[in-house]
Amino acid sequence: MIHVIAFYLFAFVTLASAVFVIMARNPVHSVLWLILAFFNAAGLMVLLGAEFIAMLLVIVYVGAVAVLFLFVVMMLDIDFAELRAGFVRNAPLGLLIAVILAIELFVGVVANSTGKAALGTPDGTGAAPVGASNIEAIGALLYSRYLFLFEAAGIILLVAMIGAIVLTHRKRTGVRPQNVADQIARRHDEATINTRPEVGAGVKL
Amino acid sequence: MTAFFQSIGMNHDWAWSVATIAGILLIALPVMLAVAMAIYFDRKIWAAMALRRGPNVVGPFGLLQSFADGLKVFLQETIIPSAANKGLFLIAPIITFTVALMAWAVIPFNSGAVLTDINVGLLYILAISSLGVYGVVIAGWSSNSKYPFFSAMRASAQMISYEVSIGFILICVVLWAGTFNLNDIVLAQKGHGLGFLNGFAFNLLLFPMWVMFLISSMAETARAPFDLTEAESELVAGYQTEYSSMSFALYWLGEYANVLLMCALNATLFFGGWLPPVDWAPLYWIPGWIWLFAKIAFFFFVFSWVKATVPRYRYDQLMRLGWKIFLPVSLGFVVLVSGYLMLTRYSA
């Protein structure tokens, strides 16, 4: 009973906030609705028993990706009239993508409901070991069967990260950043001098 | 607790619902009371370190000061700036406050005394603490005022930066304990140091992780010396500038609930949580939650102590500490800890 209530609550809020992502006039509101949708999708995954994926969804998407989204959208100076001007031009492309997504979803649902394609693994090779928790099951698979794919994904991300740094890094001249090592290495006798100047003579710097 | 409510004649669903709500109240109300007292002790500790008296008028020793303040803000008018985004402006403090209370659901107060004993407890805490930034960012944006906006920018960069190294530090703890469940992490610390000290902090490889976790938790909760989000000399009051009355109070409560949560995490992950500090039978006669409260109180004292004595960091220094020092060191310790465990525990 509680499961059912929770499922309909999460599903309804996910769908409603997904609609509001498109309907909202203010892009910041759009991002916030998107975050709500992510969050409720995580709730749905908890109900499925995939708590590890749910937590990852919240940590990665809600906690990091969406914050950057929000960051960018908040700082942009957006002209709403200009945004809406491109609507007619982009509508066919958007419709095409929407139709493709709808067909994919439909095929998936039909294939599953008619028994042509079952969710999970028919031969049992990928199934979680009985009695192991979510994390252990994913870890056992990821580091054995899918090790090379996993490492390939890691290398691609690493290359992307280094690429982003290389593209945006620039050496600036004329700035004097704090050099902590220099500051720590400085000793008392090279940093200060003790003098007793004549009256009216001053000190030479 | 579900079993108790079932025994007085409820069916399972009702018993579960009532037991959960009772559990939430059993945690949330003491946390709120603890927050009120924490604010009082915080002020008393700063005062003592500055050779002042601190709050001493309302009630005996000023103990009721926080309640008087609470009543005051409750009776004040909520001012909403006319240029503010009204809905988001009001939601932001609620988000901060709710998120600060949500994470307490997985903290074990005694053997098995935890609201939700999930096996991804630590990930849940990471997930919830990554939500905390929204309260600040939304407040900064919806206030439509420049200082809150600067503060929101700072806060989001700061919290994201330190979450990365906190994640690596937690991985070291998880590797050693072999589980994400907080109760099991506490149990794994039994007799960990020299065979009789309870706590991962008495482990030479994990002790540096604890030091970094303590500093990172100050940065994560934006406490001094990392309180750049509300640096009064630069940003008036940061993201709270436009807030008044209860919406302001919710930020205060949420902030202190977060600080107490970080203290509880320090105690739970590195100092044996509800276990007594020494693995000696008579100490187990004292209930576990008293040990946990004592440890939280100790860490809260450390937080206040630091706030009273350490000057504020500059923003570039904060970023340098997070990205250039904590991140590589904690990443190195993940390799070190997993390598050590590989060679010792899992060598067979």
Image (cartoon, coloured by chain):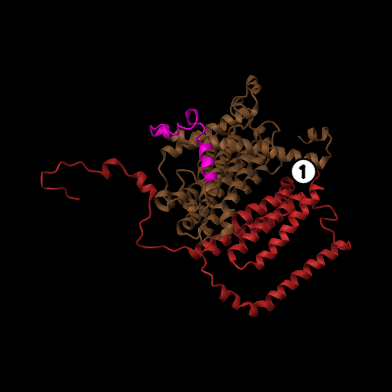
Q: Position of residue A143 (x, y in %)?
A: 70, 50
Classify mark 1: residues with Cα within 10 Å, few (<14), some (14-19) or many (20+).
few
Q: Is residue B71 left or right of residue A22?
A: left
Looking at the picture, which amino acid does disc 1 mark?
Answer: Ala
Q: In the figure, the red chain has which letter?
A: A
Q: Colour of chain B?
A: brown
Front position in the image: B235 or A92: B235
Q: Is residue B21 left or right of residue B305?
A: right
Q: Position of residue A83 (x, y in %)?
A: 58, 74
Front position in the image: B99 or A184: B99
- Element on which disc 1 rests: loop
Front position in the image: A131 or A104: A104
Front position in the image: B85 or B239: B85
Q: Position of residue B207 (x, y in %)?
A: 54, 36
Give the magenta range. Answer: B47-75
Q: Is residue B52 magenta?
A: yes
Specify whether residue B113 is in view. Answer: yes
Figure check: B61 above or below A105: above
Quadrant of residue B206 in the image? top right
Q: Is residue B154 magenta?
A: no
Q: Return the chain for callout 1.
A: A
Specify whether residue B203 is in view. Answer: no
What residue is disc 1 on? A132
